[in-house]
Image (tube, rainbow, N blue to C red):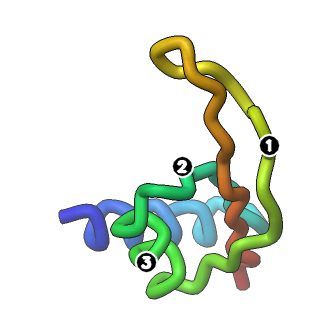
Amino acid sequence: MGRLCLGALITEAEQRGFWKLVSRIFPENVASRRLCAALGFREIGIYRRHGKLDGRWMDCVIVERLLD
């Protein structure tokens, strides 16, 4: 289901003239990182201590996909 939804988002963004999609993913969310990689996103960096979740500082992996 996630692959279908993200694929539809990519298609819609391209049709509307966007040139890039960006997102952030928790490093331990391996399934989301693999999904993004499979759909052409690349990991470009990490935000260290980006925010707190349940009182714990969390990092985020930054991903981007350039559109046609």
Q: Amino acid at mark 2?
A: Phe
Q: Secondary structure at mark 2?
A: loop
**Visible residue check, residue 17:** no
Find the distance from the CA under tag 1 to the CA under tag 3: 20 Å
Give the answer, above or below, for where 27 lies relative to 57.
below
Q: Which residue is mark 1?
A: 48
Indicate which label's residue lies in the foreground, 1 or 3: 1
Residue 46 spot, x, y in % from top left: 78, 56
> How packed is label 3: few (under 14 Cα within 10 Å), some, or many (20 or more)?
few
> How packed is label 2: few (under 14 Cα within 10 Å), some, or many (20 or more)?
some
Residue 40 spot, x, y in % from top left: 58, 85
Q: Secondary structure at mark 3?
A: helix
Specify which label sits upstream in the sequence, 2 or 1: 2
Residue placed furthest toward the left: 1
**Residue in the picture at 52% in, 21% down:** 53
Image quadrant in which you'd find residue 64: bottom right
Q: Amino acid at mark 3?
A: Arg
Q: Which residue is mark 2?
A: 26
Residue 30 spot, x, y in % from top left: 41, 67
Residue placed furthest toward the front: 56
Q: Secondary structure at mark 1?
A: strand
Q: Are marks 2 and 3 in contact (CB under 8 Å)?
A: no
Q: Left or right: 13 with respect to 50?
A: left
Give the answer, above or below, for where 44 lies relative to 62.
below
Q: Nearer the viewer, residue 45 or 3?
A: 45
Q: Which residue is mark 3?
A: 34
Image quadrant in which you'd find residue 15: bottom right
Q: Nearer the viewer, residue 16 or 21?
A: 21
Total residue callouts: 3
**Residue in the picture at 72% in, 58% down:** 62
Q: Amino acid at mark 1?
A: Arg
Q: Left or right: 38 with respect to 55?
A: left
